[in-house]
Amino acid sequence: MSNKNYYDFEQLMLKYVLEKTKDTSDPNPRYSYPLLTTDSIANNESLSQVIEAFLTIVHVEEPKKSEKILQFMYGYKNSQDKSLVDEDSLVLVRLEHNDDKAIDEAYSFLDSIVK
């Protein structure tokens, strides 16, 4: 059983987006960024899709983090070496297969990438 739940992901992602946009006018950011909320996360497969969307935001905001994002999402060693990897070893794929360990790994990666 994972230590993290969908609400933990929502909080981490919304906090990052609000800090980057410096949007303090919205009293309820859940309505401004519905894709990143638990309303969009019905299961681990949709969590995987939300994480992909969030990492796109991080990449746009902080392009220097693209190497780490590519490594996490596709298993690439770096942007030049795009060798095929065992797809089943990727965290996002394992998430879709309801691997509880993958939930913790995904949260840990997101937490580290937004710092």
Image (spheres, rainbow, N blue to C red):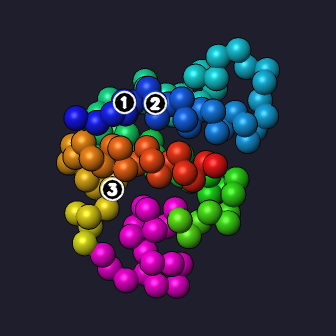
Q: Relative to residue 108, is residue 29 depicted above or below?
A: above
| Label 2 or label 3, whichever comes before in sequence order | 2
Q: Identity of the amino acid at label 1? A: Asn
Residue 109: percent from the left, percent from the top? Answer: 47, 52
Asked if the magenta segment contains residue 37, the reply would be no
The alpha-carbon separation of the residues under discs 2 and 3 comes to: 17 Å
For mark 1, give the secondary structure: loop
Residue 49: percent from the left, percent from the top? Answer: 40, 46
Label 1 sits on residue: 5
From the viewer's perspective, is 88 left or right of 75? left
Q: Identity of the amino acid at label 3? A: Val
Residue 36: percent from the left, percent from the top? Answer: 51, 34
The alpha-carbon separation of the residues under discs 3 and 1 comes to: 16 Å
Residue drawn where x is 72% and y is 37% of the image: 19
For mark 2, give the secondary structure: helix
Label 3 sits on residue: 91
Q: Residues within 10 Å of mark 2 (few under 14, many from 20)?
A: few
The alpha-carbon separation of the residues under discs 1 and 2 comes to: 5 Å
Q: Residue furthest top?
A: 27
From the viewer's perspective, is 102 left or right of 40? left
Label 2 sits on residue: 8
Asked if the magenta segment contains residue 74, the reply would be yes
Residue 90: percent from the left, percent from the top? Answer: 31, 62
What segment is highlighted magenta in the picture? Answer: 69-85
Q: Main secondary structure of the magenta part?
A: loop
